Image (cartoon, grey):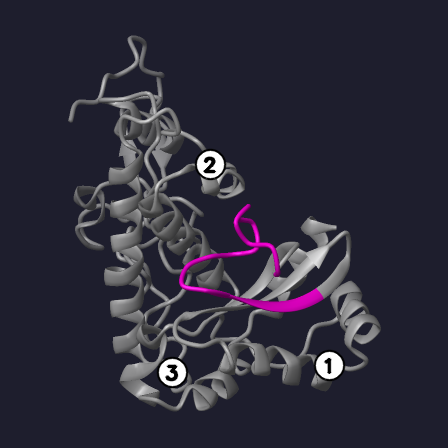
Amino acid sequence: MFFFLPPSPPAAPVVVNVLAVDPPKSDGRLLTGGVNRYASRIFLPAIWAVGIPAMPRSSLPNSFNESILNQHILHSKSNKMSFELPPLPYAYDALEPHIDSSTMQIHHGKHHAAYVNNLNAALTGTPHEGKSLEELMSIVSQLSPAVRNNGGGHYNHSLFWTVLSPKGSGAPTGELANAIQRDFGSFETFKEKFAQAAATRFGSGWAWLCSEKGKLSICSTPNQDNPLMDVVTDCNGIPVLGLDVWEHAYYLKYQNRRTDYISAFWNVVNWDEVSRRYAAAR
C-alpha cells in the first residue's frame, strides 16, 4: 500500500493523533498513548499502533491528517468502502463479572469479525457493494442469504457493543424514562417484558426495544434478523436497545442459564447511549 504525499508540505509539521486499533487496556491506556478516545470507525493498519514507544504522538512532515490517511487506506484499490470491524469502546475485561473477558474476545474478535468478512465477500462485485447497512437491511428480501445473515450480524453486534458499558446499570432518565413509564407502566414492568422476550426466543436470536415515532415496543427476532429488515413483519421500529441471546454470547460463563445472563445484562446497560438512540429515532 502506498501513500501519496501532498506536493506542498507546510512550513511547520502537523501533529496527528494516531488512534489505536485494539481496545484499551484495563487501566484505560491506549496502545499508542496520548489519545483518550475512540473513533466509530478505525481504518489505521496495525503498523501505526505498534506500542507506546513507537508513536505516542506523531509529527508528520506533511499536511496529512487522519481522514487523508484513512482515505488512502480505504481507496488505494477501490472507490467502494468495505465494512470494518468496529473497535470496542472498552477493554475486553471491562464488563466483568457480568460478561467475562474470554466471551468478549471470542464474541467480538471471532464471531463479529467473521460476519464482517463474510458480508464483504458476499457484496464484492455486486450492484449493492458500497451500500450502507441500513440500505441493505431495507432491501434484504432481494439479497442473498449470506447478506441477510452476515449483514444482520454486523448491524446487530455494532449496536450491541455500544449499549454496553462498565459504567452501566441504574435506570434511564429524561425522555426515555418518560416513554418507558408511558408505554409500559413502569421501568420494572419494562424489564420484565424485555427479559421475557429474550428468555423465550427459541434457539438463537435477539431481544429488542424499538421506537416507532417515539412509541416504544418490545419484540424479538430469530438468528441475526433485526427490525430494520423488510422480511421482518412482527418486530417493527428502529432498535434502540438489543440483547444478543445466541449461546456464543453467554455460554462460557453461564452455560445453559440464559436467564442468569439476562439478569446480569441489566448491570452493564449504557442508558446514555440508549437514550441517544431513542432521541435520534424520534
For disc 3, the marked residue is 96
> Which residue in the structure is indicated by mark 1?
187
Work out whether residue 143 or residue 276 is closer to the camera in this orientation and state it. Answer: 143
Residue 162 point in image, percent of width and height:
49, 61
Task: Indicate the amino acid at tag 2.
Answer: Ser
Which residues are the magenta region? 217-234
Which residue is drawn at the image coordinates 52% and 77% (left, top)? 198
Q: State the residue in front, 106 or 69.
A: 106
State whether residue 276 is above or below residue 178: above
Q: Which amino acid does label 1 sit on?
A: Phe
Mark 1–mark 3 distance (CA, rounded to whole Å): 24 Å
Give the Cα distance between marks 3 and 2.
33 Å
Q: Which mark is residue 266?
A: none
Magenta span: chief secondary structure: loop
Residues 84 and 10: in front is 84
Amino acid marked by disc 3: Glu
Q: Residue 255: give x, y in percent of width and height.
A: 31, 88
Examine the structure image and report whether residue 161 is included in the region drawn in magenta. Answer: no
Which numbered disc flags the more N-terminal residue, 1 or 2?
A: 2
> Which residue: 79% across, 64% down?
175
Residue 132, which numbered label? 2
Mark toward the viewer: 1 or 3: 1
| Quadrant of the rendered image containing residue 142 | top left
Q: Is residue 218 left or right of residue 253?
A: right
- Horizontal side, residue 250 vs residue 233: left or right: left
Inter-mark Cα distance, 1 to 2: 34 Å
**Residue found 50% across the figure and 82% down from its top:** 199
Sooner in the amino-acid sequence: mark 3 or mark 2: 3
Quarter of the view holding residue 12? top left
